[in-house]
Image: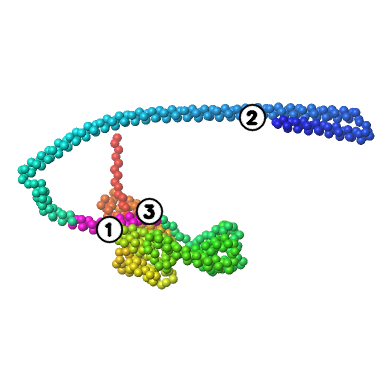
Amino acid sequence: MDPMVVVAVIFAAVLAAVGVTYLVTRKMGANAAGVIDAEALRLATEKKNHIVVEAQRDAERIIKDAELRAKEDAFKKREELTKDVERLRNELRDTERKLEKREHSLEDRHNDLGSKEKAADAQLKKLTERKEVLDKKTKELDQILADETKRLHEITGLSRDNAEKLLMDRLEREMADEVAQKIHRSMEQIKSTCETKAREMIATAIQRCAANHCADTTTSTVDIPSDDVKGRIIGREGRNIRTFEKCTGVDVIVDDTPGVVIVSAFDNVRREIARISLTKLIQDGRIHPTRIEEVVAETQAEMEQTILDVGRNAVMEVDISLPSENILKLLGRLKYRTSYSQNVLQHSIEVAHLAGLMAGEMGMNVTLAKRCGLLHDIGKAADHEMEGGHPKVGAELAKRYGETSKEVLHAIIGHHDDITVDNLYTVLVASADAISAGRPGARRESLERYVKRLENLEAVACGFPEVEQAFAIQAGRELRVIASSNRSTDADALRVCREIARAIEQQLDYPGEIKVTVIRETRSTEYAR
């Protein structure tokens, strides 16, 4: 224990004794009118001495206890220090053993390298000797060949040029029929491989133009700083939220979800205007009908400029010449339009890249193909405002706004086979359109429909007697079929593969193409005892 604490205890005891003596003296003085009672004074003195002695004993006992605790603490610290020293010694021993092992390993490696170096030197010496022998034999063969050629010229009486001409004339006569047959076979082979080459060309374009896809939604969320803002958004008797929905044409959902307000609309442009307007109102803090109308009008003007910038950026990304401003606005609006949950602008950009890549493989005008691909779905920006499908609407708008290229207009109106296709660029755009729409993940479908499509694929394959099992993989893009080795041959496997593909084409509806692979295997097992 701290010595100051001990001194304080003794001092307190002495004060207590003095206080007792004083109180007794006062009492006796009051009873004897100022005459001190000797007996009471003696008792007080004895009590004081007793208290002092007891305080000294307590102090000595406290000091002894403190010394014992100090010795125990010192002993514990010494044990901990001993353990730490022992642990460090063990670590040093382990490190020393590891270093010794590494040293032995390095010595062994050095010895191995020395042995390999000696073997390499010996091999190099053998190769050098062999090269000298080969050089000598080559010189001898060249001399023999020259002598034989000279002797042959002397026997035939023909020069080298005359002999070569005579030989070539004879070969041409003999090979004329054979060359004709080879040309015929080559033409047949070219015809049979045209489809394969076309598939390879499309596959190359797809591989060079990989794109990410995500399904767009019909709702947007706006973060709010606190749930108190929800009441201000609703307003007194709902006047604020009614004004906002009337100005923007969207539905505002204010529920128990903490920290967010949901904006819902099928028109993505309206939904984006509503989202930006609501964000501005929350940041401004002034939410009332007049302010709502001002902010929505301001945001609508900003959105027009944003749409124009988006269209201009899309044209720059595809790297074609700028069309008219009206066409740029239509392109910008495609960013806020979806088709089967696929963003139409991203789809158009991808179609442009794919068409350009395929045009480059075929030696066609790449820039024109990109222009056809980018503008092929331009009608989707206004097909809800005009009569007719989006190919017809798009062709009319493009022609009205200054597009003069016949190839572009034909690709816009004919990429869905609405008219007779007699333009190669339209075929490229239709192919690129099918590729982009058929990519896995490009278009969203329900889980039930997805599972049903896979089950139908497997059911078609399992309907053949030679099939044991069938598995639809890669999101239904490939069908793996296991054929029974007992009920079929290799020739049957080829036939079944073709028949399954034809059955899928006739019975099922699907985007893109489906690869059918039939696997037939025979295993024989025997044991050697």
Q: At numbered mark 3, what does the secondary structure look like: helix, strand or loop?
A: loop
In the rendered view, tell whether residue 74 sits above or below residue 275.
Answer: above
Q: In which quarter of the image is the N terminus?
A: top right
Q: Distance between the residues labelled 1 and 2?
A: 91 Å
Q: Residue 88 magenta-drawn?
A: no
Disc 1 residue type (three-letter): Glu
Count numbered badges in the picture.
3
In the rendered view, tell whether residue 461 sits above or below residue 524.
Answer: below
**Residue named by callout 2:** 73
CA neighbours of label 3 inside 10 A, class few (<14), some (14 to 19), many (20+): few
Q: At numbered mark 2, what does the secondary structure look like: helix, strand or loop?
A: helix
Disc 3 residue type (three-letter): Gln
**Residue named by callout 1:** 195
Q: Nearer the viewer, mark 3 or mark 2?
A: 2
Q: Distance between the residues labelled 3 and 1?
A: 24 Å
Q: Which of 55 and 352 is in front in this view?
A: 352
